[in-house]
Amino acid sequence: MTYVGGPEPAGCFFCRVIADKDRDEENLVLFRGDRALVLLNLYPYNSGHLMVAPYSHTSDLAALPPDIAGGVLALIQRSVAALNAEYGPHGHNVGMNLGRAAGAGVPDHLHAHVVPRWDGDTNFMPLMADTKVLPESLQQTHRRLRPRFEERSDG
């Protein structure tokens, strides 16, 4: 609710993180590939909820060059593998919200969400008193997942 009800930040969040290469740990960046990066979601639905965003600032999925789209998909695959290895979820939600009407919090910069799911975690975004209780902090999640991205050299 902090994100939804708070003031909209100026500029593109993803472009700021992409340019701020010296603060990857603080920005919760897990991996930088050739065409896209992986970072934790600041407002996760579940522990391990991460996002994959191309370096290109665009909101037009149909116009995304195939090599960049392929790089995003490769990092989604790598993200699922890292989450499987570290958390052992029973499934994943993977998707993009294209445009504000579709629920995009950052509608001007394409990004895919990868959300690990477990049997019995009720629904896509369970909330209680405007808060979802997570079993670990974002910094703990970052420390757990970062080494999983370093295990493979492709991407």
Image (cartoon, helix red, strand yellow):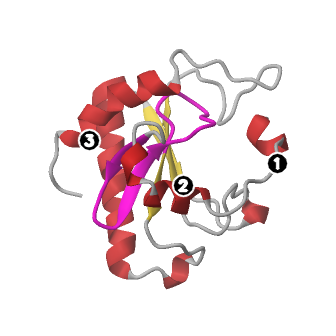
Using the image as rendered, state which of residue 47 and residue 126 is in the foreground. Answer: 47
Would you call the spot at circle 3 few (<14 residues within 10 Å), some (14-19), or many (20 or more)?
Answer: many
Nearer to us of marks 1 and 2 is 1
Q: Is residue 88 visible?
A: no
Residue 82 sits inside the magenta stretch: no
Residue kind at label 3, given as amino acid type: Phe
- Mark 2 → mark 3, Cα distance in angstroms: 20 Å
Point out the stretch of residues depicted in magenta. Answer: 29-50
Left or right: 44, with 8 as reference point: left
Nearer to us of marks 1 and 3 is 1
At x 72% / y 60%, what residue is drawn?
A: 10
Q: Earlier in the sequence, mark 2 or mark 3?
A: 2
Q: Is residue 127 visible?
A: yes
Q: How many numbered marks appear?
A: 3
Q: Which residue is mark 3?
A: 149
Kindly give the residue lying farthest to the front in the view shown.
22
At x 31% / y 26%, what residue is drawn?
A: 86
Compared with 7, 43 (above or below) is above
Q: Are marks 1 and 2 in contact (CB under 8 Å)?
A: no
Q: Which residue is mark 2?
A: 95
User: Could you say where residue 141 lies in the image, as x and y percent from the top left?
Assistant: 43, 26
Compared with 136, 19 (above or below) is below
User: Could you say where residue 128 lies in the image, as x and y percent from the top left?
Assistant: 78, 20
Residue kind at label 2, given as amino acid type: Gly
Q: Earlier in the sequence, mark 1 or mark 3?
A: 1
Q: Which residue is mark 1?
A: 7
Would you call the spot at circle 2 few (<14 residues within 10 Å), some (14-19), or many (20 or more)?
Answer: few
**Label 3 residue SS:** helix
